[in-house]
Image (tube, grey):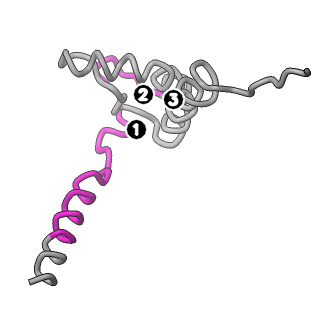
Amino acid sequence: MKIVSIFGILLVLIFVFSSCAAGPNELEKTPDKKGKIAGFWKGLWNGLIAPITFIISIFTKTVRFYEVHNSGFWYNFGFVLGAGLFLSGGILGKGRRRRRKR
């Protein structure tokens, strides 16, 4: 009985974690309706405003969290860099704490 329950839990965990796996972006390197492809700078900007965009995207269907019509690696790099600057490394990050001399 114990083996069956462990197997069941393991199976559920496999399904949960595999559902979170990212798939391919079929619209990568294809232009949007305006004929533009988002690159590094657009990725950086989207990463910086990601927390705000995420909250807005919960309440509306017209705002997206991530630009699917992107250039690939450079857009992703800019997005991660921008999100990192906003969340942990810069604007809202702890930064370095200065030690006071006593």
* 61 up-or-down from 37: above or below: above
Q: Earlier in the sequence, mark 3 or mark 2?
A: 2
Whether residues under marks 1 and 3 lie with C-beta atoms below 8 angstroms apart, the answer is no
Q: Which residue is identified by label 1?
A: 29
Compare residues 15 and 94 and report the one nearer the observer.
94
Q: Is disc 3 surrounded by few (<14), some (14 to 19) or many (20+) residues within 10 Å?
A: many
Q: Is disc 2 surrounded by few (<14), some (14 to 19) or many (20+) residues within 10 Å?
A: many
Tag 2's secondary structure? Answer: loop
Q: Which residue is identified by label 2?
A: 37
Amino acid marked by disc 1: Lys
Whether residues under marks 2 and 1 lie with C-beta atoms below 8 angstroms apart, the answer is yes
Q: Is disc 1 surrounded by few (<14), some (14 to 19) or many (20+) residues within 10 Å?
A: some
Amino acid marked by disc 3: Ala
Q: Residue at x 91, y 21 (%)?
A: 102
* 75 up-or-down from 41: above or below: below
Residue farthest to the left, as pictured: 1
Compare residues 35 and 45 and report the one nearer the observer.
45
Q: Per the image, is 36 magenta? A: yes
Asked if residue 36 lies left or right of residue 85, the reply is left
Tag 3's secondary structure? Answer: helix
Tag 1's secondary structure? Answer: loop
Q: Residue at x 49, y 28 (%)?
A: 43
Amino acid marked by disc 2: Ile
Q: Nearer the viewer, mark 1 or mark 3?
A: 3
Q: Position of residue 21 (x, y in %)?
A: 30, 54
Whether residues under marks 3 and 2 lie with C-beta atoms below 8 angstroms apart, the answer is no
> Residue 83 bears which disc, if any?
3
What separation in Å lies between label 3 and label 2 (alpha carbons)?
A: 20 Å
Which region shows up in magenta? Answer: 9-38
